[in-house]
Amino acid sequence: MTAPGTDIARGAAWIAGRRLARRDIADMPADLKPVDEAGGYAMQAALRDLLAPRLGPCIGWKVGATTAAMQTLLNVPAPCAGEMHRAGLHHRSATLRSGDFRRLGIECEIAMELGQPLGGAGPVDEAMAAAAVARIFPAAEIVDDRYGDFRSFGVPALVADFFFHAGVVLGEPVADWRRLDLAAVAGTTRANGETRVAGRGADVLGHPMRSLAWLANRVAALGRRLEPGQVVMTGSLPLPLWVAPGDRVEVRLEGLGSVSIAVD
């Protein structure tokens, strides 16, 4: 559903133009914004296709607003999902130009790669989600605040724009992840040698696998399913670190490994 007069294609095209010009979308006209999440996901799908010629195909999904702290920060009552384009994928480390972003942030996350399809054949629970995971990774999500006052920008419009997503850094894959208690995994985000953000896997909806199950059910409601080979970013532990030129950031997850990001 969208506001009277709103057109999904027009709204997606407006965002795409701003994104490709590396401009924010804080002044998105009200009549182009979706008014509920169903409209937001429909506009996200249209935007995904418009950006694909420049950013490549989608490699998976991110789940945002999975912690109470993040929901409070964003004024969002529940998790939201966004697809991830291949152009934003980095392995082990990344060097980012601050000028390519409006307000650059880094989130410490547990990423999961699916080994089999998930969702679309009835409700998915945590056990079903875990059975579908082939590997997990220490990871950092690259986020970009393109919204100005994001608390008043509107959740459906945030969803339409992939909910802050701008890229991902995946560390070395961990195949024997079942030996770990993912809820107890400690995560830290360090900048210039100083710990700035710290959390645990339990910050993410009580358990990161609960985030994957939530996503599978949400995607099924969109008439889709999660596919083998897709990567899922399960959510921040627990808040982003907003960074500046010259920052050197390390994201580390206990028992999983680390990734690094340099901001120029």
Image: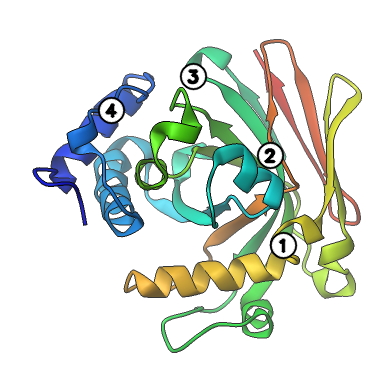
Residue drawn at x 34%, y 45% as measured from the top left: 160
Against 238, is 216 above or below? below
| 1 vs 2, front mark | 2
Disc 3 to disc 4, C-alpha distance = 15 Å
**Percent position of residue 185, x then y:** 87, 58
Is 21 located above or below residue 214 in the figure?
Answer: above
Judging by the rendered image, the residue that carries numbered circle 4 is 28
* 2 or 4: mark nearer the eye: 4
Q: Residue at x 46, y 38 (%)?
A: 87
Q: Are marks 2 and 4 in contact (CB under 8 Å)?
A: no
Q: Is residue 88 left or right of residue 171?
A: left
Tell me the crowding category of disc 1: few under 14, some 14 to 19, or many 20 or more residues within 10 angstroms, Cα based: many
The quarter of the image holding the N terminus is: bottom left
Q: Could you tell me how far apart the alpha carbons at marks 2 and 4 are, in whole angstroms?
A: 26 Å
Q: Earlier in the sequence, mark 4 or mark 1?
A: 4
Q: Which residue is mark 3?
A: 102
Q: Which residue is mark 1?
A: 136
